[in-house]
Image (tube, helix red, strand yellow):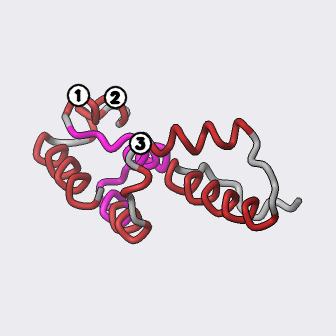
Amino acid sequence: MNIVNIEALGNYEVFQALRCNRKYRKEKGLKTPILEREVREYLKTTNCPEQKRHKIEALMKKMKEFGLYKQEVLQIINLVPQTHAELYLIIANIEERFQDSQVLEILDSIKTYL
């Protein structure tokens, strides 16, 4: 197996890969490993099934305007924070890096795209 790209995967990408894997295994009559099944079942309980690639990409583009770190954007996509408190747990030094109006704009963008 060759590693093409070393990047952190978001929950959405993992969920999509597991869905494709499941479809392939079903077509070939192969059993799905327990861990793979459990991860897929867990991700079904998150926001992954409702997320759309184009909306995630649009949010990522919008978050670049704020200069967020890749890890912060990934956590935002995975956790979909709805409140200031949740966002403060994801973004390092948020009080020093952003004004209140910017924090509100980030939250509004999350609600718009996710």
* Quarter of the N terminus within the rendering: bottom right
Left or right: 90, with 42 as reference point: left
What secondary structure is marked by label 3?
loop
Badge 3 amino acid: Thr
Residues drawn in magenta? 60-82
**Figure label count:** 3
The residue most toward the bottom is 54
* C-beta proximity under 8 Å, tags 2 and 1: yes
Q: Earlier in the sequence, mark 3 or mark 1?
A: 3
What secondary structure is the stretch in magenta mostly built from?
Answer: helix
Q: Quadrant of residue 87?
A: top left
Badge 1 amino acid: Ala
The tag on residue 4 is none
Q: Is residue 33 one of those drawn in magenta?
A: no
Q: Residue at x 30, y 63 (%)?
A: 62
Distance in Å between CA atoms under marks 2 and 1:
7 Å
Q: Residue at x 76, y 42 (%)?
A: 33
Image position, residue 43 (x, y; %): 50, 43
- Judge by depth and name the residue closer to the eye, 53 or 75: 53
What secondary structure is marked by label 2?
helix
Foreground disc of the pair 3, 1:
3
Task: Say few, some or many: other residues with alpha carbon within 10 Å of mark 2 (under 14 / 14 to 19 / 20 or more).
Answer: few
Q: Quadrant of residue 114?
A: bottom left
Pointer 3 residue? 46
Badge 2 amino acid: Leu
The tag on residue 89 is 2
What secondary structure is marked by label 1?
helix
Is the residue 13 above or below the residue 98 in the image?
A: below
Image position, residue 37 (x, y; %): 65, 42
Pointer 1 residue? 85
